[in-house]
Image (cartoon, rainbow, N blue to C red):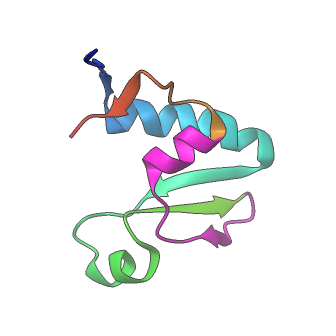
Amino acid sequence: MVKKNLVSVSERALLARVNRQLIKRGQQLLRCPPNNINALRELGRFYVVNVSGGVECQHQDIEELAKELGVLRPYEKLAE
């Protein structure tokens, strides 16, 4: 059995990678402040906004979005 060693990517680095791709679409991935309970409940930890500030996607999984956009390589994973 071959072990697959995955390289860890920090949340901050992954957020930057995702946003470099989303800006081309006029979007941005934002992180909700951890002390804002109401916003966390409504928007989730990560959410996507458009250039006018309107929320386009709530409760976004940063790792899944990064894979969809092709910015998280198969040999990488989000650091815990």
Q: Magenta region: which residues?
A: 51-68
Farthest residue, direction front: 1
- Residue 36 sits inside the magenta stretch: no
* The one of 26 and 2 positioned closer to us in this rendering: 2
Against 55, residue 4 (above or below) is above
* Image position, residue 42 (x, y; %): 43, 83
Q: Quadrant of residue 46?
A: bottom left
Q: Quadrant of the C terminus?
A: top left
Give the residue drawn at x 70%, y 52%.
27
Seen at 22% across and 70% down, the residue is 35
The one of 50 and 58 positioned closer to us in this rendering: 58
Q: Which residue is farthest right?
A: 25
Q: Position of residue 24 (x, y in %)?
A: 77, 39
Left or right of 62 on screen, residue 49: right
Depth check: give the residue in front, 65 or 11: 65
Q: Give me the residue at 38% from left, 78% from top.
A: 39
Q: Quadrant of residue 45?
A: bottom left
Left or right, residue 45 beside residue 18: left
Q: Position of residue 59 (x, y in %)?
A: 46, 69
Quarter of the N terminus within the rendering: top left
**Number of marks drawn:** 0
